[in-house]
Image: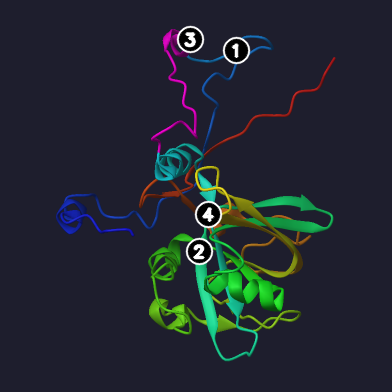
Amino acid sequence: MYKPRPDFETVQATRPEFDHDAKVTVTKPPNPTWKHGEGGNDGGESLKKNHVEIDPHEEGRPATSNYKLLISGMVPRPIALISTKSADGKTDNLAPFSYAQVINHDPPLFTVGIAGSLENAKDTLRNLSETKECVINIISEHFVEAANATSINAPYGVSEWETSGLHQAPTSIVKPARVKESVLSIEGKLVETKEFESRQTPGKKTGVLCIIEGVRFWVRDDAIDEDRSVIDLKVLKPISRLGGISYGRTTDVLELQRPQFE
């Protein structure tokens, strides 16, 4: 179980204030004159470094070590703030997942990885597997604290909508509500799930992959272009997941053209 750092508030108080007015800055790439075949842009410094080999299943290595390594190395990760409704329609759930990604556009498909098993499914997985419906909401700077509050370890039946203070907005195809504060929300239908078995404890199910098809997009009108094709990063201001309790914001951007083979 996660335990808050005892000195977190003291450390937090020493940090600079959040810059609400920070603009998205587009810079040149590290080496604007890079040519084909030149390799890294660090003058070969990275070639002087050594690597340590890690067997994820070596004797004595706990699974938590792999978890910490992966969430701190595979960064930044988008966060799917998923809303679901119980099969009886009596309870609503809202929870964040950073094992999430878009994997296709025709049809629009998304993956979400959830720790645990279908047999002992927690709130989101239980609702999703029973109703086959959800809404994927993207987290922005203007409600990051509220989104973080939805990760609270509340018992089944307790609504994270209340603990977060976020507002429900109507949907067209699915029953779960979307997050009104979210610049981008995606109504989704569950396509399939796949369970994974532990390598350390054979027979124990430790994760479930959910493939979800997007059936409706909701985009804030000041964030979408006239063709309803491109979302403005300066309005979206997405929050990403880093390692531990760290989050990232996207304010620095660089552009690289895709190469053409000659």
Task: Between residue 225 and residue 133, name the one nearer to us.
Answer: 133
- Do callouts 2 and 4 mark residues in contact (Cβ within 8 Å)? yes
- Give the vertical position of 110 relative to 155 (above or below): above
Q: Give residue 213's position: percent from left, percent from top.
A: 76, 63
The CA span between labels 1 and 3 is 11 Å
Q: Secondary structure at mark 3?
A: helix
What span is colored magenta in the figure? 43-61
- Give the vertical position of 206 relative to 95 (above or below): above
Describe residue 73's horizontal placement relative to residue 192 as left or right. Answer: left
Q: Please name the residue shown 51% across and 39% down the image.
A: 74
- Give the vertical position of 135 relative to 72 (above or below): below
Looking at marks 1 and 3 on the same chain, the residue that comes earlier in the sequence is marked by 1
**Circle on res. 96:** 2
Q: Quadrant of the N terminus?
A: bottom left
Residue that mark 3 sits on: 47
Three-letter amino acid code at the position of disc 4: Ser
Three-letter amino acid code at the position of disc 2: Pro
